[in-house]
């Protein structure tokens, strides 16, 4: 019997994407916080949710939630495969 474990792979890929998004969000916060007050603020500098720092923090929290969801997918896949192996052995 062939066991398809694609959900485990999707969970891993999603976890990696979440980590990449967290890295980008952290970089956004770091870049925004290192700007000096002498630099003028442009209207294009406002982000989707407000300031670039707020954007970065919201995106970081979002990526953490995505990572938790993907971890649950991996855990569920692992439990399912374990049950299938117990049944077929």
Image: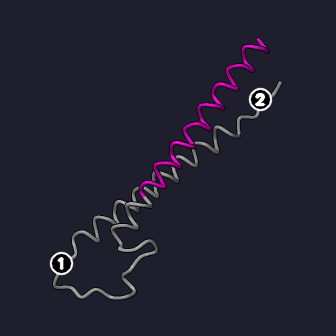
| Residue at 21% across, 70% down | 34
| Residue at 38% across, 64% down | 56
Question: Residue 76 placed where, x, y %?
Answer: 64, 31
Kindly give the residue lying farthest to the top in the view shown.
89
Q: Please tell me whether mark 2 sits on a helix, a strand or a loop.
A: loop
| Residue at 46% across, 49% down | 64
Residue under numbered circle 1: 36
Visual colour scheme: one colour
Q: Residues within 10 Å of mark 1 (few under 14, many from 20)?
A: few
Q: Is residue 80 left or right of residue 40?
A: right
Return the disc, 2 or 1, that comes first in the chain's sequence. 2
The N terminus is located in which quarter? top right
Kindly give the residue lying farthest to the right in the view shown.
1
Q: CA distance from mark 2 to mark 1?
A: 56 Å
Residue 5 sits above or below residue 28 on the image: above
Magenta stretch: helix, strand or loop mostly? helix
Question: Residue 86 placed where, x, y %?
Answer: 72, 13
Residue 66 sits above or below residue 44 on the image: above
Q: Please tell me whether mark 1 sits on a helix, a strand or a loop.
A: loop
Q: Is residue 73 left or right of residue 1?
A: left
Residue 48 among those drawn in magenta: no
| Residue at 54% across, 38% down | 71
Residue under numbered circle 2: 3
Name the mark nearer the viewer: 2 or 1: 1
Observer-nearest residue: 85 or 66? 66
Question: Residue 36 placed where, x, y %?
Answer: 18, 78
Q: Which residues are magenta?
A: 60-89
Question: Residue 21 placed where, x, y %?
Answer: 46, 58
């Amino acid at each position: 019997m062939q066991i398809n474990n694609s959900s485990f792979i999707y969970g891993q890929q999603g976890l990696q994407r979440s980590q990449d998004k967290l890295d980008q969000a952290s970089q956004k916060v770091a870049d925004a916080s290192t700007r000096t007050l002498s630099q003028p603020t442009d209207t294009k500098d406002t982000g989707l949710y407000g300031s670039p720092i707020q954007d970065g923090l919201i995106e970081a929290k979002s990526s953490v939630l995505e990572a938790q969801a993907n971890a649950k997918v991996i855990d569920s896949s692992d439990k399912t495969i374990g049950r299938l192996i117990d049944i077929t052995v």
